[in-house]
């Protein structure tokens, strides 16, 4: 890059075209290849250092060589430094830029690995992603929180933490007492390998962002612990809820997958068209997901992606109307039939591909719904969470795909966005119901405080079993007088 080019770029910094917030930057060479990906707390300040002459630059031949190779660059602003760290790591893994490889250090963030090829899979914490067919989640910048959370999940699900590939009775005899106490011990037949596998499957769903049910379970236990005056356990369970929300929630993970660049998204769409044998690239993809807890506040979501990028103006939300029980298949049929019946009535354009979150059952429900409204032929597929498997009509086995390929990454990003959108709507309805609760009648209990109280104890019944001290300890900012008034209003004894 010439001095004049640098001068021109510096002008763009001064004019405010480059933001001063956190983000990542990408350098390309004259052939359009990505040669370096970097992160910054302040994009404007960081980039300006590259494009002005300095003695330090002359001293480091690697940096000098990289700068001389830059033909263009692009930036992406994010909300926090943590997002910048993870997005930088993801792009480096996707592109392996020459100068990142040349100048990289040994610092890598922790990832969670689950190798389903093992007879009895377990959670491993690793820093390198290998092409070994295992599932990897992350990287996660907050290693301390991740380690605490993994220890909690091992106990919660009774997973083994021993390192033996195929543990047996001999391994069990050498386990530490604290390990035996919480392990479900499939190695000695305490539970079957099939039941153990179901626990692993549920864990994978949680790692993919399906955390709502787990959080409800933990909060119920937290309420029970508080009722039993076991405040130390209640505090640990509270920390576990925070850890799950911070590490695995869709909000925490959305930037890892759905922030893929336009180039990756377009390439993913092209690869997906070839994989499915479509006559053209699926430019518009519509994806559907369901969110409910035991049938309560059942809602559905539809997100739209165009050329591999979210098209938010065409997102849709559905409140399930005809299904009273917890029947995800029936809910999917209702949502898809409503969506495309209206699309046909109003003459709306149809998508190039329909994606449903789930395996063969959800796919069958989608096909049934499409036929019920006489929808013209539109390709439809299902993406199962357990192994990120792609199911297509007329085939019992999933497609053989590269899970790290652009097509799979695009589908996962679309599915994750549909799930996030469904969860957010479900939470909106649930919180609205909370706002209509009996707590509205209590002076000094506003909307935010009411939500915190119900989330801490799970229900009105849980609050009634608590003491004033327990309520105050689990709801920050609530005084003893207000806590006593709450119990009195609920007809409980306001004991200390």
Image: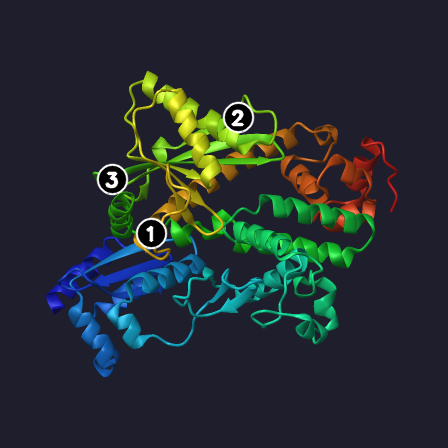
In whole angstroms, how far apart are the C-alphas of marks 2 and 1? 31 Å
Secondary structure found at label 3: loop
Query: Which residue position is annotated with label 3?
Result: 278
Which quadrant of the rendered structure holds the N terminus? bottom left
Mark nearer the N terminus (2 vs 1): 1
Mark 1 or mark 3: whose residue is earlier in sequence? 1
- Viewer-nearest of discs 3 and 2: 3
| Secondary element at image label 2 | loop
Residue with the mark numbered 2:
320
Residue at x 28% of width, y 56% of height = 75
Answer with mark 3 or mark 2, whichever residue precedes in sequence.
3
Q: Position of residue 172 (x, y in %)?
A: 69, 71
- Quick check: can you spot residue 53? no
Left or right: residue 321 compared with residue 231: left
Marks 2 and 3: in contact by CB < 8 Å?
no
Tell me the residue at 56%/62% (across/down): 121
Is 395 drawn above or below residue 7 in the view shown?
above
């Amino acid at each position: 890059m010439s001095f004049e080019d640098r001068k021109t770029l510096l002008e763009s910094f001064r004019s405010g075209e480059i933001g001063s917030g956190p983000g990542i930057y990408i350098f390309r060479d004259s052939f359009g290849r990505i040669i370096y990906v970097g992160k910054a707390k302040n994009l404007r300040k960081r980039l300006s250092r590259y494009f002005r002459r300095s003695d330090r630059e002359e001293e480091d031949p690697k940096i000098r060589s990289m700068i001389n190779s830059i033909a263009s660059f692009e930036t992406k602003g994010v909300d926090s430094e943590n997002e910048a760290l993870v997005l930088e790591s993801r792009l480096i893994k996707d592109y392996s830029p020459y100068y990142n490889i040349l100048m990289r250090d040994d610092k890598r963030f922790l990832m969670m690995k689950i190798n389903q090829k093992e007879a009895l899979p377990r959670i491993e914490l690793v820093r390198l992603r290998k092409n070994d067919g295992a599932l990897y989640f992350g990287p996660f910048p907050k290693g301390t929180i991740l380690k605490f959370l993994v220890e909690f999940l091992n106990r919660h699900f009774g997973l083994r933490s021993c390192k033996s590939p195929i543990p047996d009775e001999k391994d069990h005899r050498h386990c530490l007492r604290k390990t035996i106490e919480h392990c479900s011990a499939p190695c000695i037949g305490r539970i079957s390998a099939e039941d153990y596998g179901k626990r692993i499957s549920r864990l994978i769903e949680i790692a993919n962002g399906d955390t709502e049910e787990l959080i409800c379970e933990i909060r119920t236990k937290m309420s029970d612990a508080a009722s039993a005056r076991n405040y130390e356990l209640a505090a640990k369970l509270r920390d576990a809820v925070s850890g799950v929300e911070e590490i695995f929630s869709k909000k925490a993970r959305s930037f890892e997958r759905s922030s893929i660049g336009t180039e990756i998204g377009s390439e993913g769409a092209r690869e997906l068209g070839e994989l499915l044998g479509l006559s053209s690239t699926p430019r518009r993809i519509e994806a559907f997901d369901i969110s409910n807890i035991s049938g309560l506040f059942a809602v559905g979501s539809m997100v739209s992606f165009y050329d591999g990028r979210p098209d938010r103006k065409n997102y849709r939300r559905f409140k399930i109307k005809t299904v009273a029980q917890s029947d995800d298949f029936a809910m999917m049929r209702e949502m898809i039939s409503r969506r495309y019946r209206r699309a046909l009535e109003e003459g709306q354009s149809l998508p190039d591909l329909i994606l449903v979150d789930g395996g063969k059952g959800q796919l069958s429900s989608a096909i049934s719904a499409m036929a019920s409204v006489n929808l013209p032929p539109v390709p439809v597929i299902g993406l199962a969470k357990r192994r990120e498997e792609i199911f297509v009509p007329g085939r019992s086995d999933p497609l053989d795909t590269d899970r790290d390929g652009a097509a799979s990454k695009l589908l996962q990003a679309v599915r994750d966005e549909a799930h996030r959108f469904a969860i957010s709507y479900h939470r909106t309805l649930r919180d609205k119901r909370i706002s209509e609760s009996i707590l509205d009648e209590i002076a000094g209990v506003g909307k935010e405080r009411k939500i915190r109280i119900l989330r801490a104890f799970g229900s009105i019944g849980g609050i009634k079993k608590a003491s004033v001290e327990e309520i105050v300890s689990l709801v920050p900012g609530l005084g003893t007088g207000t806590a006593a008034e709450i119990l009195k209003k609920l007809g409980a004894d306001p004991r200390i």
